[in-house]
Image: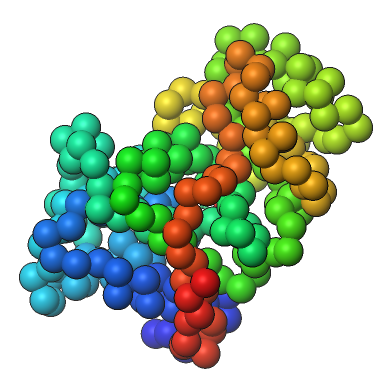
C-alpha cells in the first residue's frame, strides 16, 4: 500500500509515523488538521484498535473531528480537556527557529488555540515545508465577516505593494464562494514573499480590529518531525 503513495505522501505518512513516539497512554492529545495530520489520526486509530492505546483527543477542525470519530478515537472538547499534554499538527512552512506558517487548511484559529493550550507542540512536516525564511507560502489571516472588505483594505494599506487574496472554497480559485471557517470567519491569503520581520507583521496585523488571528505561529512549536519518503525521519 505504501508503495502506491506518491513520494510527498509517503514523507507525510513517515512524519506522522515517527511522531507517534511522543504519544503516551492516558494523554490528552490535540489533533491537527490537513493531510499530514490525517495520517496521524489514522495511525492513532490503528494503535487504539491493535494495542488498546487509551487517549482522549481534541480536534482542531470539523474535518479532523469527523475522521477521528470514524477511526474510533475518544473525542472530547477543549473545554472538557481543560489543558492538553501534547498537540501534533502539520504546517505549511517552518524556519530554523521553528516559527511556522499555518492555515493552508483554513483551521489556523482552532489550531492556535489548541497549540496554546498544550504543554508541547510537535509539528509533522515533509521536507517541502522547510524554509530559511517564512513567506513563500501565502500567509493566511482569519478575519470577521462584518466589514470584511474594509478590513482587507486596511491590510492592503498596511502591506502596501503586496497582494491580498480572499480564500475561496476551492484553493486559489478566483470564482466561487468565499471559504467560511469553522468559526464563521473568512480567510485572506497574503502573498508576502520572504518575511523579514515576522513579529512586526504578526503584531501589525493583529492591531486591525477585524483581524481575528494570523497563521504565524511564533514561539509555539517545540519539535519538528520531518519524515522522508524512504522511511526515516529527522527531529529538529
Ligand atoms: C491547516 C494547516 C495544515 O497543518 C497545513 O496546511 C499543512 O497541511 P498538509 O499537512 O495537508 O500539507 O495549517 O490549517
- The front one of 169 and 147 is 147
Location of the N terminus (image quadrant): bottom left
Query: Quick check: can you spot residue 216?
Result: yes
Seen in the image, is 128 located left or right of residue 90?
Answer: right
- The front one of 19 and 35 is 19
Q: Residue placed at 76% from the left, 17% from the top?
A: 154
Residue 218, image x and y in percent?
Answer: 56, 46
Q: Residue placed at 70% from the left, 26% from the top?
A: 204
Residue 165, compared with residue 56, is above or below; it is: above
Query: Quick check: can you spot residue 176?
Result: no
Residue 37, image x and y in percent?
Answer: 41, 60
Q: Residue placed at 31% from the left, 51% from the top?
A: 119
Seen in the image, is 184 located left or right of residue 52?
Answer: right
Residue 55, image x and y in percent?
Answer: 15, 58
Quadrant in the rendering for residue 50: bottom left
Q: Residue placed at 30% from the left, 69% from the top?
A: 22
Residue 112, compared with residue 12, is above or below; it is: above
Seen in the image, is 9 located left or right of residue 156?
Answer: left
Residue 8, compared with residue 142, is above or below; it is: below
Residue 111, image x and y in percent?
Answer: 43, 43
Amino acid at each position: 500500500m505504501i508503495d502506491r503513495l506518491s513520494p510527498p505522501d509517503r514523507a507525510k505518512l513517515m512524519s506522522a509515523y515517527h511522531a507517534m513516539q511522543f504519544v503516551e497512554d492516558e494523554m490528552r492529545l490535540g489533533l491537527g488538521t490537513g493531510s499530514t495530520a490525517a495520517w496521524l489520526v489514522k495511525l492513532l486509530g490503528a494503535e487504539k484498535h491493535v494495542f488498546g492505546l487509551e487517549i482522549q483527543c481534541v480536534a482542531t477542525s470539523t474535518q479532523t473531528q469527523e475522521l477521528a470519530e470514524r477511526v474510533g478515537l475518544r473525542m472530547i472538547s477543549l473545554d472538557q480537556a481543560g489543558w492538553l499534554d501534547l498537540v501534533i499538527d502539520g504546517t505549511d512552512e517552518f524556519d530554523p527557529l521553528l516559527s511556522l506558517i499555518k492555515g493552508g487548511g483554513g483551521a489556523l484559529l482552532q489550531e492556535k488555540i489548541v497549540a496554546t493550550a498544550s504543554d508541547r507542540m510537535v509539528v509533522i512536516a515533509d521536507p517541502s515545508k522547510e524554509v530559511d525564511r517564512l513567506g513563500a507560502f501565502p500567509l493566511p489571516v482569519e478575519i470577521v465577516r462584518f466589514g470584511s472588505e474594509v478590513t482587507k483594505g486596511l491590510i492592503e494599506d498596511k502591506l502596501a505593494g503586496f497582494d491580498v487574496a480572499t480564500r475561496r472554497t476551492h484553493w486559489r480559485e478566483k470564482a466561487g464562494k468565499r471559504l467560511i471557517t469553522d468559526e464563521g470567519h473568512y480567510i485572506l491569503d497574503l502573498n508576502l514573499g520572504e518575511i523579514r520581520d515576522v513579529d512586526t507583521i504578526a503584531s501589525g496585523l493583529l492591531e486591525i480590529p477585524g483581524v481575528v488571528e494570523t497563521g504565524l505561529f511564533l514561539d509555539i512549536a517545540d519539535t519538528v518531525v520531518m519524515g522522508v519518503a524512504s522511511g526515516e525521519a529527522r527531529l529538529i
